[in-house]
Image (cartoon, rainbow, N blue to C red):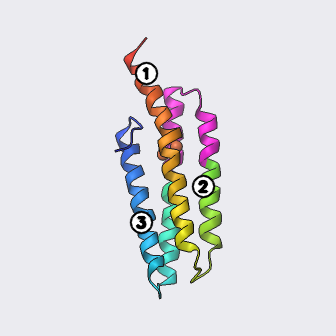
Amino acid sequence: MHKFNDQVTDAEHDFIISKFNDLCEIVALEDYDQPAREELQGLFLHYTSEHFSREEAVMRAAGYPYQAQHATAHANMQDEFGRVLNAMPVGSPNLQADLVLLRQMFLHHILTYDEAYGEWLADGLRGP
Ligand SMILES: [Fe+2]
Ligand SMILES: [Fe+2]
């Protein structure tokens, strides 16, 4: 559905969104399993970090002129994910709302930064 013009990247976006949803589901349970949440959270941060690195490598290989700015946006987002997820104590009433905000932040990045790369790539493929 999202257009990075790279199938693996587009599939990763959908996968990360589904992991956000899994996290939302687990913290919605009144008496959720804290080790399960921590495991899911650790995996989530691993997936996003891998995704960002891979995306940056794709951009570097393509000679994308805004790769450095894009990498900075990734680093800021990854910091924010870690900061919010690791700081939320068990049973925190704000956790669900914060997850929704983080998901929004990620979607916004896809629709702006990632799509800008997809458009740049498509322009180059179309030629002058
Ligand atoms: Fe992305
Ligand atoms: Fe990105």
Residue 49 visible? The answer is no
Q: Which disc number belongs to residue 123?
A: 1
Helix or strand or loop: what does disc 3 sit on?
helix
* Residue 104 percent coordinates (x, y): 51, 55
Q: Which residue is mark 3?
A: 21
Q: Nearer the viewer, mark 2 or mark 1?
A: 1
Does 67 lie within the magenta span?
Answer: yes
Q: Nearer the viewer, mark 3 or mark 2?
A: 3
Comes first in the chain, label 2 or label 1: 2
Q: Which residue is mark 2?
A: 78
Determine crowd level at label 2: few under 14, some 14-19, many 20+ residues with C-alpha closer than 10 A. Answer: some
Residue 27 visible? The answer is yes
Determine crowd level at label 3: few under 14, some 14-19, many 20+ residues with C-alpha closer than 10 A. Answer: some
Total numbered circles: 3
Q: Which residues are magenta?
A: 50-74
Which quadrant, please, contains the C terminus? top left
* Residue 21 percent coordinates (x, y): 42, 66
**Looking at the picture, which amino acid does disc 2 mark?**
Gln
The residue lying at 51 percent from left, 33 percent from top is 59
Distance between the alpha carbons at the discs numbered 2 and 1: 29 Å
The residue lying at 48 percent from left, 77 percent from top is 27
The residue lying at 42 percent from left, 38 percent from top is 4
**Looking at the picture, which amino acid does disc 3 mark?**
Asn
